[in-house]
């Protein structure tokens, strides 16, 4: 049995400068899903040819900027995350090597061995967010599993989270006693899954 050694984190994308290289279908997909999950993400996109859909997205999100030109090594300077999303292997490799030399995290679309991070499938229900990873083996499975969770997680989940936040804020005692009390309250979720009665 293999073991997924990836460590999932949740980034405040508005605190980072992200670069997408590529203005076709792949670049469009990466831009769309980044903004779907983090609508305040600051993204700069570089490509010679840019789809009409990407321009449409940029009009809706003013913090997204587009530069129609060939990629240059200096484009990665000042960026925290970079996504190479062109259909040209040599360009993607140029982006990859530029990031490696600058210590910048890079994702090369459809090339897991050249990725420092993956863009996993994401389930969002109000404040609940679940990231799904197959360790780069099957994005299609991750997509279908996301759809399954979206269909089956109750809409009431956000109310549950709000209630738990209220309870946590009212608890007294030290950290350990608070954790123990919250563990007791949420233990019902293991048995009933989607029901937490408000009292």
Image (cartoon, grey):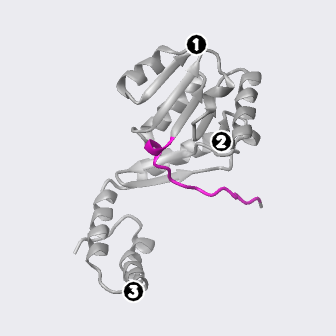
103 or 136, which is in the foreground? 103
- For image coordinates 75% across by 33% down, the residue present is 97
Residue to which mark 1 is pinned: 49
Which residue is labeled 2 in the image? 104
**Image-quadrant location for residue 102:** top right
Q: Is residue 23 magenta?
A: no
Q: Indicate whether residue 13 is drawn in magenta.
A: yes
Q: Which of marks 3 and 1 precedes in the sequence?
A: 1
Quarter location, residue 95? top right
Q: Which residue matches tag 3?
A: 177
Give the spatial CA distance, label 1 vs label 3: 58 Å
Left or right of 180, for residue 98:
right
Q: Residue 164: percent from the left, percent from the top?
A: 31, 69
SS at badge 3: helix
Q: Residue furthest left?
A: 199
Q: Is residue 38 above or below residue 91?
A: below
**Residues at marks 2 and 3, CA–CA distance in whole angstroms:** 41 Å
**From this viewpoint, is residue 166 visible?**
yes
The N terminus lies in which quarter of the figure? Answer: bottom right
Residue depth check, mark 1 versus mark 2: number of the one nearer the observer: 2
Image x and y of residue 101, in percent: 74, 38
Q: Nearer the viewer, residue 41 or 108?
A: 41
The picture places residue 165, in percent across and down from the top left corner, at 31, 68
What secondary structure is marked by label 1?
loop
Sequence-wise first label, 1 or 2 = 1
Quarter holding the C terminus is bottom left
Q: Give the range drawn in magenta.
A: 2-16
- How many marks overall? 3
């Amino acid at each position: 049995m293999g073991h997924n050694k990836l460590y999932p984190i949740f980034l405040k994308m508005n605190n980072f400068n992200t670069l997408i290289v590529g203005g076709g279908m792949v670049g469009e997909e990466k831009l769309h899903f980044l903004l779907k999950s983090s609508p305040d993400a600051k993204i700069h996109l570089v490509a010679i040819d840019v789809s009409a859909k990407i321009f449409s997205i940029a009009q809706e999100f003013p913090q997204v900027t587009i530069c129609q030109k060939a990629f240059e090594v200096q484009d990665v300077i000042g960026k925290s995350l970079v996504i190479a999303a062109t259909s040209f292997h040599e360009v993607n490799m140029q982006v990859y090597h530029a990031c490696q030399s600058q210590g910048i995290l890079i994702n090369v679309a459809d090339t897991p061995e050249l990725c420092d991070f993956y863009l996993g499938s994401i389930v969002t229900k109000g404040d609940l967010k679940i990231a799904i990873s197959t360790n780069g083996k099957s994005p299609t499975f991750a997509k279908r599993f996301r759809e399954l969770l979206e269909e089956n997680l109750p809409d009431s989940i956000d109310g549950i989270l709000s209630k738990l936040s209220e309870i946590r804020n009212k608890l007294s005692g030290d950290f350990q006693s608070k954790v123990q009390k919250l563990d007791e309250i949420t233990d019902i979720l293991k048995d009933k899954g989607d029901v937490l009665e408000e009292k």
